[in-house]
Amino acid sequence: MAKNYKRILLKLSGEALLGEQGHGIDAKMLAHYADEIKQVQNHGIEVSVVIGGGNIFRGIKGATEGMDRVQGDYMGMLATMINSMALQDALERKGVHTRLMSAIRMEEIAEPYIRRRAVRHLEKERVIIFGAGTGNPYFTTDTAASLRAIEIEADVILKGTRVNGIYDSDPEKNNDAKKFDTISGDEVLQRRLNVMDLTAFTLCRDNKTPIIVFNVNKAGNLLKVVNKDRSIGTTVVWDKK
């Protein structure tokens, strides 16, 4: 059996925190993610997390309604901090030591992001939550996840979704959609599959950082993916066989 991953970056969408609600944060979903992360950390895995802010605010949506795009994106970064603080609280209530690091300085609630300090926190078995995206407008939290994963030398990016992996069409709209167990990065681009935005995907490709897309809402799936259970999710591969 293949050795499990040692250091991971988990990417969660802000919308995932909605649960059955139409807005805000569902406490049940927050507790579920905290349980999944704790279970993995208990197996000696170094865990870092990037979470979006789409359940609270989307910069692009604001821009289309007349708001300045840069202003909207900064508001989106603050939304990720709200979600990050909520996840930090959920983890610490379960006894998990965490550090929240922000790309925008806000010392009262988070440490500034410093790469060496982040790596040190991981080595000391603390879960790191990276907030505020990259700290720059026009970049998504997918790009922030790719950038942070590369900087801390994570073994893999685990993109948690509500579907079981990457399909040739939307499985929530097409019952006959075909799931891929593995897929090359080139094929993802050729098929225009919505895995990550192009900037994030290109960063991963250029640095040969593996991506696994999986259903994070099913209990136990995160640990299975970390243990390289290939029946879970879809792995994006960069090297042609």
Image (cartoon, grey):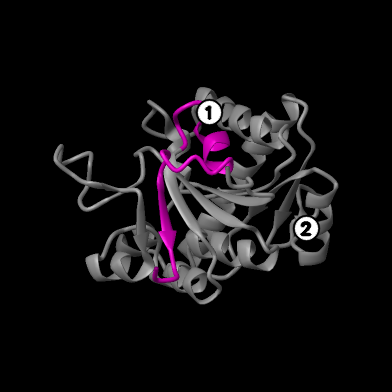
Residue 75, disc: none
Residue 205 as seen in the image, left or right of residue 88: left
Q: Give the range drawn in magenta.
A: 216-241
Name the kind of residue labelled 2 in the image: Ala
**Residue 192 location, x and y as percent?**
25, 65
Q: Can residue 58 be seen in this view?
A: yes
User: Is there any visible trace of residue 55 in the rendered image?
Assistant: no
Q: What residue type is labelled 1?
A: Gly
The dominant secondary structure in magenta is loop
Is 82 on the left or on the right of 138, as rendered?
A: right
Q: State yes or no: residue 240 in magenta.
A: yes
Which element carries disc 1, helix, strand or loop?
Answer: loop
Q: Which residue is labeled 2 in the image? A: 118
In the image, residue 164 lies at what x, y percent? Answer: 36, 39
Query: In x, y percent, where is residue 135?
Result: 61, 66
Q: Quadrant of the C terminus?
A: bottom left
Mark 1 vs mark 2, foreground winner is 1
Q: Which of marks 1 and 2 is nearer the N terminus?
A: 2
Q: Where is residue 195 in the image (x, y as percent from the top left)?
A: 37, 57
The residue positioned 48% from the left and 60% from the top of the image is: 142
Q: Residues within 10 Å of mark 2 (few under 14, many from 20)?
A: many
Give the left or right position of residue 93, taking residue 67 as reference.
right
Q: Where is 107 relative to 207, above or below?
A: above
101 within the magenta span? no
Residue drawn at x 76%, y 65% as measured from the top left: 115
Kindly identify the residue that appears in the image at 65 percent across and 35 percent down.
Answer: 40
Front residue (pair 222, 96) = 222
Q: Residue at x 34, y 59 (%)?
A: 183
Task: Write down the residue under mark 1.
Answer: 220
- Label 1 crowd bin: few (<14), some (14–19), many (20+), radius 10 Å: some
